[in-house]
Image (cartoon, rainbow, N blue to C red):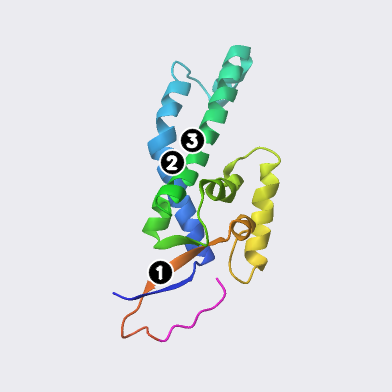
Amino acid sequence: MRTLTIPASYSRRFFAFLVDLLFIELALLGPFAGLLLKGVSGSPMEVYDALLGDPQTLRLLNILAVFIVLVVYLYFVLFEYVLGETPGMMIFNLTRVFEKDSFAHCLLRNLFIIPFPPFQIVLLADMIYLFYNQEGQRLSEYFTHSKVTMLVPLTSKNTEIVISKP
């Protein structure tokens, strides 16, 4: 079947990202929740006080937070580098196209995942650039010469496709 490659819509990109976050939560992070809350019971405030009241527990939580961020970051980097798309992108028929692919480009493209300063600024700049760029690219995609596209199957019914801004 012949396909046409067009810029991915904002909604498809958003929902693909949500699917990826759900997959990360269920498959990668879910097991840690049980370990973290093992032996802790009570109201949410009691659990909060128990977890943050002990300096050793607080140190463990910080290490765990860094580990979780690293796992999430590597999820996006490795899927994009090895397969060119994440499971969420596969479900929504999205793919990443690039001029020259490298592991460094995948690292740069996904910096927005890291929730610590100054990377929060990267997320903000990425989103602002996405909505003002005619190609529908994030700023990190512009710098890595890549973009996310959608594959549309061509049939006799939809051979005349009007392409609008994503």
Identity, as a three-letter code, of the amino acid under mark 3: Val
Q: Earlier in the sequence, mark 1 or mark 3?
A: 3
Q: Earlier in the sequence, mark 1 or mark 2?
A: 2
- The vertical placement of 7 against 29, above or below, is below
Q: Residues within 10 Å of mark 1 (few under 14, many from 20)?
A: some
Residue 127 picture location, percent across and down? 64, 57
- Numbered range of the magenta stretch: 160-166
Disc number placed over residue 71 in the picture, else none = 3
- The vertical placement of 162 against 120, above or below, is below
Q: Residue at x 70, y 39 (%)?
A: 117
Residue 71 picture location, percent across and down? 48, 35
Q: Residues within 10 Å of mark 2 (few under 14, many from 20)?
A: some
Identity, as a three-letter code, of the amino acid under mark 2: Ile
Disc number placed over residue 138 in the picture, else none = none
Q: 121 or 44: which is nearer to us?
A: 121
- The vertical placement of 115 against 93, above or below, is above
Identity, as a three-letter code, of the amino acid under mark 1: Leu
* Residue at image mark 2: 24
In the rendered structure, are the residues bearing label 3 and label 2 in contact, judged by CB atoms less than 8 Å apart?
yes
* Residue at image mark 1: 151
- The vertical placement of 106 against 73, above or below, is below
Question: Which is in the foreground here, disc 1 or disc 2?
Answer: 1
**Which of the 4 image quadrants contains residue 44?**
top right
Q: Earlier in the sequence, mark 3 or mark 2?
A: 2
Residue 114 picture location, percent across and down? 60, 40
